[in-house]
Amino acid sequence: MPRLGSAQRWAAAAGRWGCRLLALLLLLVPGPCGASEITFELPDNAKQCFYEDITQGTKCTLEFQVITGGHYDVDCRLEDPDGNVLYKEMKKQYDSFTFTASKNGTYKFCFSNEFSTFTHKTVYFDFQVGEDPPLFPSENRVSALTQMESACVSIHEALKSVIDYQTHFRLREAQGRSRAEDLNTRVAYWSVGEALILLVVSIGQVFLLKSFFSDKRTTTTRVGS
């Protein structure tokens, strides 16, 4: 039976370790948790509410940002199942609020654009309920985490941070694009207005200069004796 050379043995070992590492990295991708991440349109003079069932003692975080529209501000209000106000801000561009549910029930948070008469808004919010489960549960575990498992946990946390940064920069990019498009529209209208004013002034100057050089005919009338 032919023996494998050293290079072949190293290639086979690398392939086995590569498969194991790939399977491990698939476990590191942050999975879905109790979170709602929505981008929606909020018309002028409108109010939009959302509801979430939360158990007592659960830590929650509400984060929102206005992407487009007007002065990029909106009213936000958060209430517990009894109607008590936990958070209330007026005309905020972005904010984040963290709280721990004091009772079981349906919590309500609303975004209002009722103060705006003709400008609609685009609002993004992320409502996180609870925390992500540990990558390696501690139940039925005797030994501590190995060096590989500790590294996996660190990479997992780093990936979650990368996802948060990507979301943040996507929102900033969308907001910057909206501002640029709005500025471009205003510049275009201003340019058209300047062109029309220049055309009217030019025509007026032509008629004014023409009136200076035109012959004025005078009529004389004889009065008979």
Image (tube, helix red, strand yellow):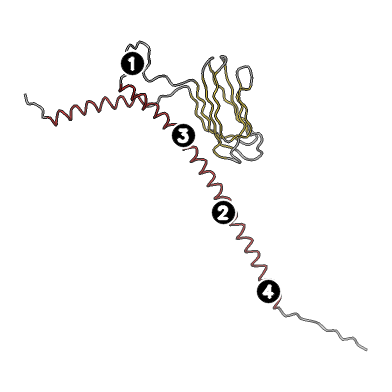
Going from N to C along the chain, the mark reached first, 2 or 1, is 1
The spot of residue 173 in percent (x, y) is 48, 41
Q: State how far apart marks 4 and 2 are (Cα).
A: 32 Å
Q: Label 2 crowding class (10 Å Cα cut-off): few <14, some 14-19, many 20+?
A: few
* Residue named by callout 4: 209
**Three-letter amino acid code of the residue under disc 1:** Ala
| Residue extending furthest toward the right | 225
Q: State how far apart marks 3 and 1 are (Cα).
A: 34 Å
Q: Residue at x 32, y 13 (%)?
A: 143
Marks 3 and 2 close (CB-CB < 8 Å): no
Marks 3 and 4 close (CB-CB < 8 Å): no
Dot 1 falls on a residue whose secondary structure is: loop
Say which mark, if any, is on residue 188. 2
Going from N to C along the chain, the mark reached first, 3 or 4, is 3
Going from N to C along the chain, the mark reached first, 4 or 1, is 1
The spot of residue 153 in percent (x, y) is 36, 23
**Three-letter amino acid code of the residue under disc 2:** Ala
Hey, which quadrant is residue 47 in on the image? top right
Going from N to C along the chain, the mark reached first, 3 or 2, is 3
* Residue named by callout 1: 144
The spot of residue 37 in percent (x, y) is 49, 29
The spot of residue 135 in percent (x, y) is 38, 20
Q: Can you tell which of label 3 and label 2 is closer to the viewer?
A: 3
Question: Would you say 136 lies left or right of 172 here?
Answer: left
Q: State how far apart marks 3 and 4 are (Cα).
A: 63 Å
Q: Residue at x 42, y 30 (%)?
A: 161
**Three-letter amino acid code of the residue under disc 4:** Leu
Q: State how far apart marks 4 and 1 are (Cα).
A: 96 Å
* Residue named by callout 3: 167
Marks 4 and 1 close (CB-CB < 8 Å): no
